[in-house]
Amino acid sequence: MPLPPASLPPLRPGAVIHGPGSYGVDTLLDGFSAELKRRGFRIGGLVQRNHGPGDDCAERMELVDIATGHAYDITQKLGRESQSCRVDPTGVAEASQAIRNAVSSGVDLLVVNKFAGLESHGDGLSDEMLAAIAEGIPVLTSVGSRYLNEWQTATGGFCDLLSPVADALWRWWGPQRMYQDLVQGITDAEVHRVVTGDKWVLVETDGGLGVAARQAPAGEDDPRRWTCRSLRDLAAMAAQSWDPLEIAVGVAALNAHYNRPDLTGVTGNGLDLFASVEGRVVVVGGFPQIARRLPRAQVIDMNPQDGEYPEAACDWLLPGADAVAVTASAFANRTLPRLLRVSAGATVAMIGPGTPLTPRLFDYGIQSLAGFVAVDREAVARTIAGGGGSRDFHPYGRMVTLHRPPHS
């Protein structure tokens, strides 16, 4: 009996904790939700934007519906000397419809601008927020430190408290979602050829050719069954299937889109990225010439050789490492999300011909990507069909390295 498609893991409600004033947090939530929406995720809810000062020297506050862009004015005009809360409960009540609409449509993420004074007393947007949590919809909000106890009481402590920085939001969002993210970034195309060799697979379109290491033992399979499906359809298997061969074909489909012939970047061997690192370097996966290129590295492999560590050592060696090099096979076999979580704080590079070369991966905790771009497609296809490995088809393409821009 086939397994159901892989589904994204549930998220506990995320609360960005901040001190007095929330203008920086408003901008953070606004930017994060806009970026996810740009990438194709279904985002709903409300973000706060402030404008001003107005006639009474106070800023005008509005809540903006993320789905429609409609703005709700929530500012009470109390006069310039007033010390009372300037949030208009009537405007907030009107804006709450945006949250109900988002919940009913089953969004991937519900953003609620804040849990503050009104919500701490059970008013404002509290009912809508808690209803979404009860429905299992991921909820992201902000909470001032003065209302932290009320937030913990409202959620029963079932939440994640987040620092007010973008990296914390992406870590909360989770690296499992990078697969869906990459699929959504694909421009669909007709698949011309699929090759399933003993060690590698490839997918080819007019725009490019992508490869991925085969995750299942070689067997009897007819790759022609894949060519009747679109590129995006094949790529979705990287995010949804549990079948090792289907996942490999899905990753190759991703790479057929992202590792395009016109892609430019730094050339050279990806392992050289860490040659000058003085701290502790951990390498996950078997890389050729690893002992010569990184003689001080601690190497973890599923089939460890003399002097290498078993896979179980990941939870011991990756925390606190200065740099981590991960083979692209970790992306294909779906162990990469776990590796990224336990490598938090390290400089991480994903290296290998099956690496998707796209900046979309940088936000999930990877700083460098070193992958393969095919030049002589026929030679690559012939080599893989004949059972060749990466060393055999490397001469027919070029390795390209992308780096995360500083401060991005």
Image (cartoon, rainbow, N blue to C red):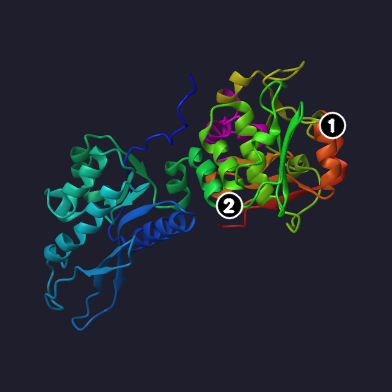
Q: Position of residue 253 (x, y in %)?
A: 65, 43
Q: Quadrant of the C terminus?
A: bottom right
Q: Nearer the viewer, mark 1 or mark 2?
A: 2
Give the residue displayed 25% in from the left and 58% down from the top: 98
Q: Nearer the viewer, residue 140 or 274?
A: 140
Q: Position of residue 298 (x, y in %)?
A: 70, 27
Image: 213 above or below 65: above
Q: Position of residue 333 (x, y in %)?
A: 61, 29
Q: Is residue 94 left or right of residue 65?
A: left
Give the residue displayed 16% in from the left and 47% down from the top: 127
CA neighbours of label 1 inside 10 A, class few (<14), some (14 to 19), many (20+)? few
* Region rendered in magenta: 316-345
Mark 1 to mark 2: distance in Å? 38 Å
1 and 2 marks in contact (CB < 8 Å): no
Of the numbered discs 1 and 2, the one sitting upstream in the chain is: 2
Image: 156 above or below 23: above
Give the residue displayed 61% in from the left and 57% down from the top: 406
Disc tally is 2
Q: Is residue 140 left or right of residue 238?
A: left
Q: Position of residue 217 (x, y in %)?
A: 70, 20
Q: Nearer the viewer, residue 30 or 5?
A: 5
> At label 2, which amino acid type do we have?
Ile
Q: Which residue is labeled 1 in the image?
A: 292
> At label 1, which amino acid type do we have?
Arg
Q: Is residue 9 left or right of residue 375?
A: left
Q: Is residue 211 left or right of residue 364?
A: right
Q: Nearer the viewer, residue 377 or 87?
A: 377
Q: Is residue 317 magenta?
A: yes
Image: 170 above or below 134: below
Residue 46 picture quarter:
bottom left
Q: Is residue 322 visible?
A: no
